[in-house]
Image (spheres, rainbow, N blue to C red):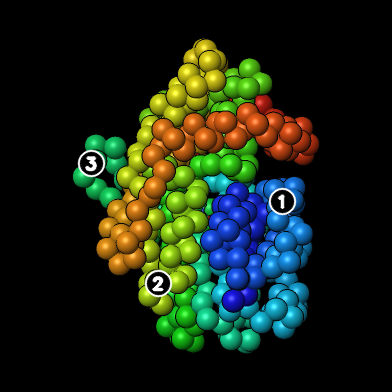
Amino acid sequence: MTIIVTGGAGFIGSNFIFHMLDAHPEDRIVCLDKLTYAGNLSTLRDVMDRPNFRFVRLDICDREGVYRLFEEEHPDIVVNFAAESHVDRSIEDPSVFLQTNIIGTSVLMDACRKYGIGRFHQVGTDEVYGDLPLDRPDLFFTEETPIRTSSPYSSSKAGADLLVMAYHRTFGLPVTVSRCSNNYGPYQFPEKLIPLMIANCLNDKPLPVYGEGLNVRDWLYVEDHCKAIDLILRKGRVGEVYNIGGHNEMRNIDIVKLICRALDKPESLITHVTDRKGHDMRYAIDPAKIHRELGWLPETKFEDGIRRTIAWYLEHRDWWQEIISGEYQNYYEKMYGNRGTV
Ligand code: NAD
Ligand code: TYD
């Protein structure tokens, strides 16, 4: 099989490529990535020379380029990870989120319709369900929970999901959608909570916690997410949505304190800064459907996953130091430089 993986130079896409090349060496993987600020070719260095791997620098919004690639590769499956993925950036400038996340997804699906495809899989997020109140720990997101978005990011991802389901109903495109909770692990861009806090700790910089840090996220080790997608591709029912999450809810402040402890840094580095606009309080996935239908369960406990993740960032300083020393510095200054403390 030939599988096009879009956004494969980013965090989850690259981990997915590593998983697939290991688990299914008989398949050919074509990575399509625009290499935005979030895409790093160095991440794919170890697989670049594999005979069953090809990297193509391309924007998923570039219709001609995408069609040309489909003519060359005749893919059996497309897995769409390519997206603008950071909520804070979407608050600064929503437009590129609408372009890539919605228009780009439609271009990929048009190519799938034109050239034929076995499966189009859309990698979605639990953020499309909005948030849950902190005082109702009995509530979880199921696949039936109404879409109710908070940020331009989640709205653009919800728009993409709706379009994917519409292409299934209207054109019969064989699609699946997964909606996963927050991921952590190797190669996550250091603008996201966990790698940002690890990098700042290691550089003895303040740790900017939004508001009181009581917001809850449901953390899943990236490899478990990749295995779930692989399972959906092989055994999932076409036209279905699958939620992915491991019942691992943590408050932001507790994660940051845990990272301080693991790296032997003082909690006095923690700085409470002005809250994110529209900040979702709690995400919590009910993964019963994917467990019941496909037998998926998370394999990595949080304490093991976070230890491995911290060790990875310690061993791969060159990877993230290079990122935070470049253009990212301007972003950091813009987002955190004038942010008030609370
Ligand atoms: P990321 O920001 O690390 O990587 C995104 C990748 O997409 C980058 O390599 C980037 O270069 C590429 N890209 C961006 N725009 C493109 C375009 N127009 N054409 C081609 N490539 C483009 O993101 P991530 O954290 O790996 O997330 C991957 C997917 O998973 C996203 O769709 C995201 O919404 C979803 N998701 C992420 C999480 C999470 O916790 N990170 C959780 C659930 C779902
Ligand atoms: P993030 O990693 O951006 O993921 P998402 O917003 O998609 O869940 O943020 C995770 C949580 O951490 C979220 O509640 C916002 C918070 N946060 C901070 O407190 N400080 C930070 O510097 C960042 C980036 C996030």
Instruction: For marks 1 and 3, give the one nearer the viewer.
Output: 1
Displayed quadrant of residue 324: top right
| Residue 319, percent from left and from top | 71, 38
Name which residue lies at 51% across and 42% down: 184
Name which residue lies at 57% across and 47% down: 86
- Disc number for residue 136: 3
- Above or below residue 270? Residue 66 is below
Quick one: label 2, few (<14), some, or many (20+) residues within 10 Å? few
The secondary structure type at the circle numbered 1 is: helix
On-image quarter of the N terminus: bottom right
| Residue 131, percent from left and from top | 36, 47
Name which residue lies at 54% across and 36% down: 309
Q: CA distance from mark 2 to mark 1?
A: 29 Å
Residue tagged 2: 235
* Amino acid type at image mark 1: Asp
Left or right: 224 as drawn, with respect to 196: left
Residue tagged 1: 46
- Above or below residue 281? Residue 8 is below
Residue 305 seen in render: yes
- Above or below residue 312? Residue 69 is below
Camera-nearest residue between 322 and 159: 322
Circle nearer the N terminus (2, 1) = 1
* Amino acid type at image mark 3: Arg
